């Protein structure tokens, strides 16, 4: 079975369920904090191809589970009908904000645009949480808009990068079209005080998680911790071979470019 197909995605969800994990949206995880047990916070960053998000949403709905879907504000606004359909299935909708990058690092303009976009999204769905978009090509980090302001002032109860204790919650993301893509990821990594916790928790469990098969094997061997944030980019997961091949080739190229950028950043730091 090829990786990053919807068939493989179903396989992953099935194995998480049969290993005893319960699924939470990010908002419900925050509201149920302390209940313990095996939990997956299921997060989707809808970077592009929103229609693919409908496919993962339907699959999850078929399994009787729900997750959080973070939408970016495109030039035509948010994909209204699609968002309503996903919310009706019981999934949480959130804002995948990139206002600081769009406003070239100007915090005042970023906050203004954040407020406006949040209001537009709230006309479609109920919004409790937000999550930053990594904006790999920008020199700005969207999270920096919260150095002087608080998203809580906008009725937001959580932002994963600030409100999850990654010492306790393992971070798994398909960034880079692989599960160990931190080396090529510029910002989409769980970092506490900007240090990657993922590598630490993996070293502790001596895990090599590259393919989805590796995660499934680790689940079968009971090697994963009780709490996991699983981040999916729905555009990567498809059973149609042309888009599947396109994702494979374009992501491999992007990974090469990103690793050059990461090396340059590290050289500057050194
Ligand atoms: Zn994103």
Image (cartoon, rainbow, N blue to C red):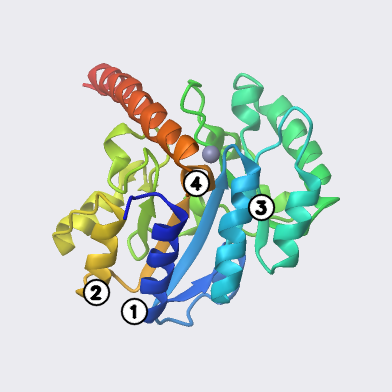
Q: Residue at x 81, y 37 (%)?
A: 116
* Label 2 sits on residue: 220
* Label 4 sits on residue: 233
What separation in Å lies between label 1 and label 2 (alpha carbons)? 7 Å
Secondary structure type for disc 1: loop
Does the beta carbon at disc 4 come under 8 Å from ligand 1?
yes
Secondary structure type for disc 4: loop
Quarter of the rendering occupied by the C terminus: top left
* Label 1 sits on residue: 19
Counting labels gives 4
Nearer to us of marks 3 and 2 is 2
Graded by Cα atoms within 10 Å as few (under 14), some (14 to 19) or many (20 or more), the crowding at tag 1 reads some
Q: Which mark sits nearer the N-terminus, 3 or 2?
A: 3
Q: Which mark sits nearer the N-terminus, 1 or 2?
A: 1
Residue 157 occupies which quadrant of the picture? Answer: bottom right
Q: Which mark sits nearer the N-terminus, 1 or 4?
A: 1
- The percent position of residue 28, horizontal first and vertical second, equals 60, 71
Evaluate if marks 1 and 2 touch, with contact meaning CB atoms under 8 Å apart: yes
* Along the line of sight, the residue nearer the viewer: 245 or 118: 245
- The percent position of residue 196, horizontal first and vertical second, equals 30, 46
Q: Which mark sits nearer the N-terminus, 4 or 2?
A: 2
Secondary structure type for disc 2: helix
Q: Is 88 situated left or right of 20 in this image?
A: right
Q: Is 173 situated left or right of 150 in this image?
A: left
What separation in Å lies between label 4 and label 2 (alpha carbons)? 24 Å
* Label 3 sits on residue: 94
Q: Residue at x 59, y 22 (%)?
A: 105
- The percent position of residue 10, horizontal first and vertical second, equals 44, 65
What separation in Å lies between label 3 and label 2 (alpha carbons)? 32 Å
Q: Residue at x 34, y 74 (%)?
A: 226
What separation in Å lies between label 3 and label 4 (alpha carbons)? 14 Å
């Amino acid at each position: 079975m090829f990786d990053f197909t919807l068939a493989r995605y179903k396989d992953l969800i099935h194995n998480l369920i049969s290993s005893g994990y319960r699924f939470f949206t990010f908002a419900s995880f925050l509201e149920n904090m302390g209940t313990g047990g095996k939990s997956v916070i299921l997060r989707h960053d809808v970077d592009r191809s929103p229609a693919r998000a409908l496919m993962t949403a339907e699959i999850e709905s078929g399994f009787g589970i729900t997750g959080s879907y973070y939408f970016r504000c495109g030039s035509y606004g948010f994909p209204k009908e699609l968002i309503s359909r996903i919310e009706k299935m019981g999934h949480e909708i959130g804002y995948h904000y990139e206002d600081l990058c769009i406003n070239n690092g100007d915090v005042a303009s970023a906050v203004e645009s954040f407020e406006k976009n949040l209001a537009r999204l709230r006309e479609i769905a109920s919004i409790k949480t937000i999550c930053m978009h990594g904006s790999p090509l920008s020199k700005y980090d969207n999270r920096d808009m919260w150095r002087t302001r608080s998203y809580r002032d906008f009725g937001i109860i959580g932002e994963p990068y600030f409100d999850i204790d990654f010492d306790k919650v393992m971070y798994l993301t398909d960034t880079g079209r692989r599960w160990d893509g931190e080396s090529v990821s510029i910002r989409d990594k769980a970092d506490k005080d900007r240090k990657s916790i993922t590598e630490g928790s993996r070293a502790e469990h001596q895990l090599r998680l590259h393919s989805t098969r590796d995660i499934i094997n680790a689940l079968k061997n009971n090697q994963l911790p009780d709490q996991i944030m699983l981040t999916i980019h729905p555009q990567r997961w498809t059973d149609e071979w042309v888009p599947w091949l396109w994702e494979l080739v374009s992501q491999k190229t992007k990974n090469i470019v990103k690793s050059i950028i990461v090396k340059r950043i590290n050289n500057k730091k050194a």
